[in-house]
Amino acid sequence: MAKDKAPGRPRAETPKGFRDYFGAEVSERKAMLDTIAEVYHRYGFDPLETSAVETVEALGKFLPDVDRPNEGVFAWQDEDKDWLALRYDLTAPLARVAAQFRNDLPSPYRRYAMGPVWRNEKPGPGRFRQFYQCDADTVGSSSVAADAEICAMLADALEATGIPRGDYVVKVNNRKVLNGVMEVAGVLDPADPERFAHERGIVLRAIDKIDRLGPEGVRALLGEGRKDESGDFTKGAGLSAEQAGVIMSFVAANTQIDRRLYDAAKFEAASNSGLEPIALNAWAAGNFSDAKLIPEVYQTHRNRFVCEYLDEIVGKSEQGKQGVNELREIQTLLSAQGYDASRIKVDPSVVRGLAYYTGPVFEAELTFEILDEKGRPRQFGSVAGGGRYDGLVRRFTGQEVPATGVSIGVDRLLAALRAKGRTQADTRGPVVVTVMDRERMADYQAMAGELRREGIRAEVYLGNPKNFGNQLKYADKRQSPVAVIQGADEAARGVVQLKDLILGARIAAEATHEEWKAQPAQSEVARGDLVAAVRRLLDRR
Amino acid sequence: MAKDKAPGRPRAETPKGFRDYFGAEVSERKAMLDTIAEVYHRYGFDPLETSAVETVEALGKFLPDVDRPNEGVFAWQDEDKDWLALRYDLTAPLARVAAQFRNDLPSPYRRYAMGPVWRNEKPGPGRFRQFYQCDADTVGSSSVAADAEICAMLADALEATGIPRGDYVVKVNNRKVLNGVMEVAGVLDPADPERFAHERGIVLRAIDKIDRLGPEGVRALLGEGRKDESGDFTKGAGLSAEQAGVIMSFVAANTQIDRRLYDAAKFEAASNSGLEPIALNAWAAGNFSDAKLIPEVYQTHRNRFVCEYLDEIVGKSEQGKQGVNELREIQTLLSAQGYDASRIKVDPSVVRGLAYYTGPVFEAELTFEILDEKGRPRQFGSVAGGGRYDGLVRRFTGQEVPATGVSIGVDRLLAALRAKGRTQADTRGPVVVTVMDRERMADYQAMAGELRREGIRAEVYLGNPKNFGNQLKYADKRQSPVAVIQGADEAARGVVQLKDLILGARIAAEATHEEWKAQPAQSEVARGDLVAAVRRLLDRR
């Protein structure tokens, strides 16, 4: 670019951390969001589109996620010296709307919102300062039926976009259960919720690192602390062995539950319940969590076992017991509608944005494998998350308004659909009608018009027609499937030439000379057959 | 709101000049833009989505429209002290993209863009600081075929959104013709384009006011000046009688052309060409421009007459003659494709954003009448405009790149579709399944699930179910067509009650007691027939 930069000329560049989206990128995202919107709409959710700009006062200065308090917003002062800012998410504007229009909106108010948000963060590879969010929330319902509905709707939305059943799971946990664990472990005092906040922070971060550090690492962080490979020491929460034991039994929940399920399955197998031996064998080999191998027992009993196990841990905490009961109720509602544990399962390991949430929390994971940047297979992972939060409107009105919702990671889900070849947009290039004779532009336009009227994407080449090679290069760049050619000779004979550009490219890449002769990528058809012949070429694929 | 504003609590308000869009407002706009995008896509145009944020350097400080140089942008400094701003239109980002990616994009590059833009202007009634634009442009083609294509595509898009043929007209003019008129009138010197700029400004503004001031008012402004009703004097351009005469013959073009068409029609009628007498009579009565009354002659000949007339005025100007020839070529291309003068017509009165445009200019007008705020019928007017502009990329690269495009006024067109009852979104509220028995929530969810699986929008009431009246009020607020009711008694008997809320509202408003009894708004159906029965109620409308 530098060579073009004459003095006084502006640079043709996006600001750092921003990007443009072209053609298929736009269409594929739009098709995905349209599909999701259709599901949300069918569930009775209404679209809401707030403006990109809010007052800083209404927005609050920082993101609600306390783990990242320094993330900023793009803000400026208007002519009245009020500070305005671009929204950093779709929840803060919902809070403002729910307060501003609380007398006009139906209650409960179900709404979905899709659109860009802006973060004044340091950009990085694949990390942009403008990106899409896609949220659905129910404001004004304290019923766990609202949470269950969000989970079911999320599962339906994922399937509608093209994620097949079995390739995703919606995991549900409850913040109250975690609070119960903290209570029982003596790091949460219901009478003084602020006490032990520091210790709880360390405990939460430790639990969240289970995948990376393993049980020993987490255990160390609960106690005195942990020295990592580099020799750096991280100070721990200083819990006693007994306290740490409570937390560790929670951390080990999934493994313990699978072991109990195994025992139950063995018992059922012994009583000849029809469980397939292959499933038991796989299980015995340690594949506890492979739901595909042990569908019946796993799906029927897992959620029940989880709740039993959690009840044992948090039994001494009122809040903890309430949390487990809520999980039970969600489960009952969902299984009654056919959402079994292969699609929506209770999972104590879900520890997301917990400062924000006050009840059930959800996370949707894609369970198929993709190759990471080093070519190693890894599970695709999380594409959506959410939960219940009661503080939504309190900042504005002082009132607690119950709310629950979910946010789909638009770029993540789109990447997954691309990885699986399941994007739904028609991203084919147009049929290009070339211009052999500038004087007959009206004829070429008529051809494109006929194709369009039959629903076929088509255009006339409108650059300088002198160099015919440039026209075909253009058609290639447009990923055009077919080029239409009619010179003076063809016009006189009442025919057109159709050049099959996709077959042409394949022949050029692969075919032998014989094949090339047998399967010509160019054919002549009567002018009157233009539309039908192009249609045949397009349909062949 | 004030009563809720405790100390330290933020106000729940949008910033001044911004607003929220709810439910049907969002769906209807989306349906309209989707329809337009489909037409544009079929014409070979690719979607482009640039970020909302640009560098102020790339954006240029002001809008390109010199008539409003003080309109500002929302801008702020980032951490590197670079100034960033929200885009004020979709053309400036296109210019940046066309320069930044000029080696990668196909040429010509056809793109469409739809999205919000932001203006830091004083807000007013119906005038917001964030609004949608919807643009289509072809960059890199100097052929008038590109201009003609834009006009045809615009006509197709308007019809697709629901504006019937006959209710719109795309008017085409050419800036070169206007330049030619200025040349012939001696207020444009091709050798020194800056000369007479002041006079031309007055002339342009005068021409633009023809509808308000009439010929006498315009004539006064071309000469010494004009005193308005209040006695205020506006200084004129100071043209001689001869100079003003040239401009006035241009201003009178439409009337003159219609008169010539009338004479031609009389001649044709005299030679028994089959023109309907009624058309001639209407014409004789002065209804020159009513295309509906005189379809054959008007549509066939009008565009030809316009070009002949303009040729007579600008004959001495090279640029003027070129402009008329371009109009002729556009017309030939369009009529060959069946776009006659009832849909796309050459109209010398189109004088839009002329500082910006360099060739053909277009404007789409809706010709049906609506009532203005005082209840008087008036023509709906302009909903789209555009034209050719060659300065697009020059700011960045120093090169002239030919470009032509059109912008649809999203809010205007949407208002027109609403006025005609032609919006295309499904904005019906959901079927509401009420909750008579909190313990049977799973049953109610199952009902909603069954309805949804058949594509019927449905939801369970998730507020506090204690007060049944509140549930029905909620259903009303949701504009629900049907409420489903099942208490313990109905559950025991295996039936549900369906309350037809639309019929119910109608009966409550209109019906006599006899009708009310004969056509009950509530009916009982077997639980197994729920979906079919709801479907029947919905289909009846």
Image (tube, coloured by chain):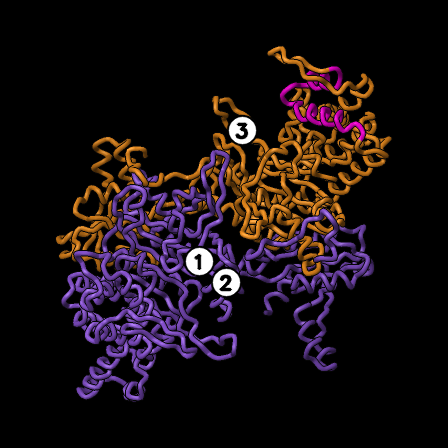
Chain colours: A purple, B orange
Query: Mark 1 or mark 3, which is nearer to you?
Result: 1
- B423, A218: nearer the viewer: A218
Circle 3 sits on which residue? B369
Q: Which amino acid does label 1 sit on?
A: Thr
Do the CB atoms of the residues marked 1 and 2 lie less than 8 Å apart? yes
Circle 1 sits on which residue? A35
Quarter containing the C terminus of chain B = top left
SS at circle 1 = helix
Classify 10 Å Cα crowding around label 1: few (below 14), some (14-19), many (20 and above): some
**Residue A528's image quarter?**
bottom right
Number of the label disc, if any, that sits on residue A424: 2
Coordinates of residue B26 in the picture (x, y in percent): 44, 45
User: Which residue range is magenta in the image?
Assistant: B195-224
Classify 10 Å Cα crowding around label 3: few (below 14), some (14-19), many (20 and above): some
Q: Which amino acid does label 2 sit on?
A: Gln
Q: What residue type is labelled 3?
A: Glu
> Spatial distance from mark 1 to mark 3, Cα to Cα?
38 Å
SS at circle 2 = loop
Residue A400 visible here: yes
Q: In this view, does A435 lie above or below B132?
A: below
- A265, B299: nearer the viewer: A265
**Residue B454's image quarter?**
bottom left
**Residue A337's image quarter?**
bottom left
Residue B265 visible here: no
Residue lying at 17% horizontally and 50% vertically, measured from the top left: B436
Chain containing mark 1: A
The chief SS type of the magenta part is helix
Q: Is residue A315 above or below residue A446?
A: below
